[in-house]
Amino acid sequence: MFQIMSADDAIRMIPDGACICVNSFVGIENPVELHEALGRRFHETGSPAHLTVVSSAGFGVWDENRAAEGYIREGAVDKLICGHFGAMPSTKKIVLEDRFEAYNLPLGCISHAIRAQAGGLPGALSKVGLDIFVDPRRQGPGINRISKSKSYVKLVEVDGEEFLYYKLPKINVAMIKGTAADPRGNISFDDMYMSGDALSICQATKANGGIVLVQVDRLVDMPSRPRNAIIPGCFVDAIVVVEPGWRDEAYTALTGSFEIPYSEWSLWTDRIESLSNQRRQDSTAARIIGKRAAKELRKEDIVNVGIGIPEMVSHYARKNGMLDHITLTVESGSVGGFPASGAVFGAMIGATCVIDMSNQFDLYDNGGLDICFMGALEVDRHGNVNAHHGPGAFAGIGGFANITAKTPTVVFCLTFNTKGLSVSRKGGIISIDQNGSIPKFVNEIQHVSFSARQAVANGQRVLYVTERCVLTLTRTGLKLLEVYPGVDVVRDILALLPFPIEI
C-alpha cells in the first residue's frame, strides 16, 4: 500500500547496492527532488552506496549542480547504464576519468530490456547494434577502461540469424516523475511531456520484489479516469508531492493541455527557442544542408529528425508546405506535431498522441519510419558513421542506432569539415570561402554508430548531405551523387578526401 511522505523519507527506503531505474528523457521529466534527497542522504550518511543506475535516455537537467550529478560525483554510484548522457554535463566528464563503470547502450534496446524484465524475462533480442560499437565483436558497450562487463550485450544466434541480446541488472528501485496521484495512488501524466518507460519500470521493479518511488506535482480528490492512469496505485510504495515551479506558457504548450493548430507551430517554436540557452544550429552551411535534405521528403512519410543540423530539415519542410503532409515522431513517444529542441528536446508542439517509449521503438526497430535525418561527427571510406563519441568527449548513442538500423531512407546531415568553415550563398551559387581545419570524412573511424555494411545488407538508401555536395552509399563505398552550383569538384571535394570515391 502506498504512503505519502517526504522525499527524504522515501529515499531512506533505498538500500545500499540497489539497482535504480530512472524514468526521464535526456533533460525532461526527471524526478529532481528524489535525486536531490538521495544526494543529501549520501552526503550526510554515506548511504545508499554502491548503486547501479539505469536509464533509457539519461536523467540530467543540463546543470552539473542539480539532480543526480552531485551524488554521482561524490561516489554513490558504482555503475551507470544509459542511452544518452547529454544532459549530464558533470557525469559525462568524470565517466572518462574511470571513476565508476559506465555503459552506453542504444536507447531503444534499454527500453525493450526494461520491458522484458517487466514480463519476467531476463533480456531482449534485437537486430539493433549489430556491427556497431556495442557489438561484442567490436568494442562492446563499456565507455571507459574499467567498464569491462560482458553481461549486458551478447551475440546470439536464433534460427540461423544473428541477434544481440540485451540484459540489464535486476531493477529493484523505480524513480518516477508523474503529474498527479489520486486517492487510490494511481499516477497520471497529464501535464507531462511524455510517460516514457514509466509503466514498464514499475512492473519490472515489482517483478523483482523492489520499491516504486513517485514524485508528483499534486494530489487530486477525484479518482483518475481508467485510461488516464498510467501507473496503477497497487504498484506504488511512496508518493512524494513537490509543487512545481512556475512554467512559461511556451513550455506548457508542450504538455498537450491545449490544442496548437498547424498554423501556429512556427510561433510556438520561436517562443520556446527564445527561452532556451541551447539554440538551433543556424549557419549558412546548416541552412544549405537543411534545404537540400528536405527535398527527400515525400507526402505521407513517417519521419524522425535528429538534433543539430538536421533540425533545419523541419524548418524547410515548414517553409515549403511539406510539414503539413508528413508525420514527425520523437523517441520519447510523441507522434505528430513539431519536435522541440534545446533543454526540452523530447517534447513536441501539437502532438497528436504520446505513446510509451518502448512502443515508439517498436516502430523504429521494425522499419516503420519512411525516412530519418541524422547528424554525424565523422564518416569513413566505407560509409560508416560516428555520431556519438568525439575526441575526449561523448554524448552517447541515444536513439540513433535504433532509428537508423532499419529505416528505408537514412539521410545524414553534416558539414564537409568543421572548425573555421566559412560558406556563403548568393543567387543559388555556393562559395566555399574557407575550409575548416577538422575533416568530417576520414579514412577510419574509431567509434561506429552506423554500419554501412549492415545498411547495404538491409537494402537501405543512405545519403550524406553536406553544404557542397551529396554522396550516397554503394556496395563498394561512397559515390558522388550531386555537386552544388559554384562548387569545384576537384578543389572543393576530391582534393579534400583521404580516400577515393566513385563519381
Image (cartoon, grey):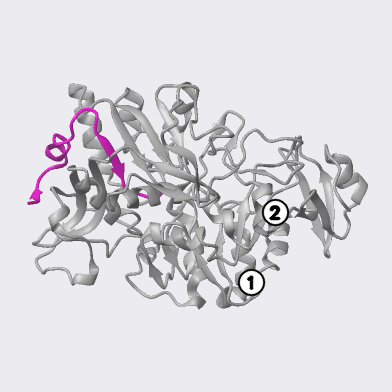
Three-letter residue code for mark 2: Val
Residue at the image point whose x is 69% and y is 62% from the top:
293
- Examine the rendered structure and indicate whether residue 82 appears above or below residue 127: above
The mark that comes first in sequence, 2 or 1, is: 1
Q: Magenta stretch: give its range.
A: 1-27
Element carrying mark 2: helix
- Residue 320 in the image, given as x and y percentages of width and height: 66, 74
Is 77 on the left-hand or right-hand side of 336? left
Q: Is residue 3 magenta?
A: yes
Residue position marked by numbered label 2 in the rendering: 456
Residue position marked by numbered label 1 in the rendering: 319
Q: In which quarter of the view is residue 40 placed?
A: top left
Three-letter residue code for mark 1: Lys
Q: Closest to the observer: 192 or 453?
A: 453
Q: In which quarter of the view is residue 482 placed?
A: bottom right
Q: Closest to the observer: 29 or 399?
A: 399
How crowded is the residue under tag 2: few (<14 C-alpha within 10 Å), some, or many (20+)? some
Is 29 on the left-hand or right-hand side of 213? right
- Residue 285 in the image, given as x and y percentages of width and height: 72, 52
- Residue 159 in the image, given as x and y percentages of width and height: 51, 52
Residue at the image point whose x is 48% and y is 31% from the top:
142
- Residue 452 in the image, given as x and y percentages of width and height: 68, 48
Q: Closest to the observer: 317 or 434?
A: 317
Question: In this figure, what is the number of numbered marks?
Answer: 2
Q: Is residue 243 magenta?
A: no
Q: Closest to the observer: 188 or 233?
A: 233
Does residue 29 show up?
A: no
CA gap, disc 2 and disc 1? 33 Å
Q: Are marks 2 and 1 in contact (CB under 8 Å)?
A: no
Is 62 on the left-hand or right-hand side of 20? right
How crowded is the residue under tag 1: few (<14 C-alpha within 10 Å), some, or many (20+)? few
